[in-house]
Amino acid sequence: MKNKRLLLSALACIVSGVAGAQGIMGGHVTGNIQLDGQMSHADSVIGAEDVPEHLKLNARADILYTNGDFSAGLRFEAYQTPLLGFNAQYTGQGIAHYFVSYKAKRISVTAGHFYEQFGSGMILRAYEDRYLGLDNALLGLNVTLRPVDGLTVKALAGKQRVYWDYGNGLVRGLDAEADLNSLVKPLSDSKLHMTLGAGFVSKYEEEESIPSAADPASRLNLPLNVGAAAVRLNIDYGHFTLQSEYARKGQDPSKINDYIYRPGEALMVNMSYSRRGLSASLQAKHIDNMGFKSVRSQAGEMLFINYLPAINKQYTYASLTMFPYVTQVNGENGLQGEVAYRFKKGTLLGGKYGTDVTLNASTIYGLDTVQVGGAGTEGYTASWLGLGQHYFTDASLEVEKKLSKKLTLTAIYCYQEFNPAVEGEEPGLYHNHIVVGDLHWRVDKKHSLHFKAEWMGSDSRYAPDEGLTDRRAGDWLMGFVEWSIGTHWFLSASDQYAYNDGTGNYPSIAVGYTQGTTRLQVGYGKQREGLLCIGGVCRPVPASNGLTFSLSTSF
Amino acid sequence: MLGLLMAGTLMAQGAKLPEGVTLRTLDGKNVQSSVIQNDGKPVIISFWATWCGPCMLELKTIREQYDEWVEETGVKMFIVSIDDARTAARVKGVAEKQGWSDTGDDEFKHYYEVLLDSNREFATALNIGQDPPHTFVINGKGEIVWQHKGYQPGAEDELIEQVRNLLK
């Protein structure tokens, strides 16, 4: 407790100190503050539990001091107690993040906490997602060198944050990226742009005692150092783009792969063509045992060194994200394709303002594996292109049409197949049909209205007596209306209703006010239990029923 | 409390734009944030993402007026995508299809400059949370003179008014 008070007064000192120093030392103080609160009371129909402390509160403040190439910052976080769905290990408060940094043309150095990414993140991505309650910042040293134009070299070492502590594993990384058009003179005027990159990450962890599956009396001989390497190539030629990255990981027995010794492997290829009015892309992904954590005995969402995003399209509509796909880091093969076309204005389908049509489809399967043993063995064998369990498929058609100067309509139809096995549940396959209508109406200069209507028909069922406990199951109707008044105020009301399985009715209202960078939002209503997902990483959010508020500002 | 926060908002006006942060161009090149400048004329920076509805609405709305804005004020708009590895590959297609980036056709006279900030390093340096859109007006000296969170229809009129104020 004493420790916390000390930290608090240190924070107060620093904040007032640097704020006072603004102008005097020629630097600037900037920052941002966010407060999220929640009150919830029991509701057995939707499965919301009572909150005995009445109020749950997440708060954070980032303070950044910048003076020329130099900057220093810290973040204070408080979870008293954490919002529903956040891990209880966040309970507490203190300075969670601090750093000093020097960033100039040829060199950048950061000491303290930092975020970083090599390539697309397949072997290393330190990042934060405040809504998922996920922060794998590294505490250590991060250096970036740009010795000549077109060459970037990064080197880092550190330990990862896990709630209010740090993982025992030590993470070291080195990455180089060359922009060939800047480095190779004859290519400097070429229409062909090429970027080549390569990275290496190694983690070190002390020995520990894990029993072997074959002989529980014997212990696994665990590798103390585990390496992962990746190469990537990016080609850009006029309207065409190719992005690709291939990664390999050495033997890395861990809790998430059940302590098997099979090396990991991943490939991501993205091809696209785009010009005015048309874009087309095809993306393929292969993942085989690529979960890479800095602490081998940790399950859960924390302590990942790398980042493997989901390959399917990211929607924002509630019905389309009801069953979100979660990346299977232990193995998957996925494909996504999209074509978007604009019918020009003045044509038959384009009408007066033009019409946008987007077709998207994706499909994801598990690997076709043959088991060869348990902990302490290779685990399984798998072929590259073999398909195992079907995890997810979706296909959608989206039409966006400006009807008049004031009205814009978007309509979506999506067919979706979802296997709950990706969330660790009993395998099965839900078949969902989803229709979305979205209308923006700019009433006049000061007022605008936004309507959304969504329907989902699903063969999934909610029947607790039969052991079917997924409250997202069944058929749904959803409605949403938002009224914007000027550029400051908005009022909204929404409802989500499971109309034949009795999993509930979720009405809610909200009001918000924005002034400059300050935003206050207050809501009241019921929140559906579900998975909150950002980029294929998900966090379960329990049902809640009551008041929520959020205040944020940056300065 | 709100009053305090708003006073705080004023405090940082005049802060310089960070120059040493690495960003990526649509053709895959690394550049530093010092490329965000306009030879002494005003700059608008808009943080967005392909999955962000209000961002798309804002950028489409401004697109319809952007040629006029540039002719009138000389402003240059940089749109910085915070799409991460999941959706970053979509940015180029969206920008080219929408007429936001220059593809060599002559449908518009002026285009946005598109940059990628996949791990939100630049966004973090500018104290933006995770919720785009967030818009800045930068004066000819590279100082932040105005910023706004979120987008509601009509906000584009306030934005260009701030740019006009710089020219007075």
Image (spheres, coloured by chain):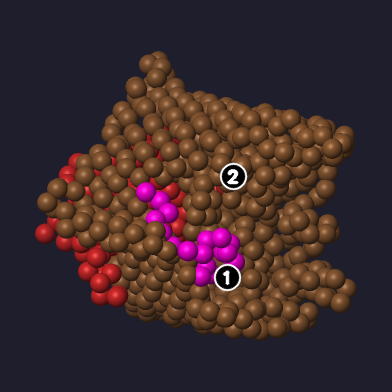
Chain colours: A brown, B red
Of residue B155 and residue A8, the one placed in the foreground of this image is A8
- Indicate the quadrant where residue A244 lies: top right
- Disc on res. A304: 2
At a point 32% along the width and 30% down the height, the residue shown is A107
Q: Quick one: SS at disc 2? A: loop
Mark 1 belongs to chain: A
As drawn, the residue found furthest toward the front would be: A2
The reply to the same-chain question for discs 1 and 2 is: yes
A349 sits to left or right of A370: left
Quarter that holds the C terminus of chain A: bottom left
* Circle 1 residues within 10 Å: few <14, some 14–19, many ≥20: many
A82 sits to left or right of A262: left
Of residue A382 and residue A170, the one placed in the foreground of this image is A170
Total labels drawn: 2
The image position of residue B115, as x and y in percent, is 40, 43
Amino acid residing under circle 2: Phe
Residues marked 1 and 2 touching at CB (< 8 Å): no
Of residue B118 and residue A156, the one placed in the foreground of this image is A156
Q: Quick one: SS at disc 1? A: loop
At a point 52% along the width and 61% down the height, the residue shown is A90
Q: Is residue A279 magenta?
A: no
Q: For the magenta stretch, what is the residue range?
A: A81-98
**Residue marked by disc 1:** A84
Eyeballing the image, is A309 above or below A158?
below
Mark 2 belongs to chain: A
Amino acid residing under circle 1: Leu
Q: Is residue A84 magenta?
A: yes
The image position of residue B17, as x and y in percent, is 26, 47
Closer to the N terminus: mark 1 or mark 2? 1
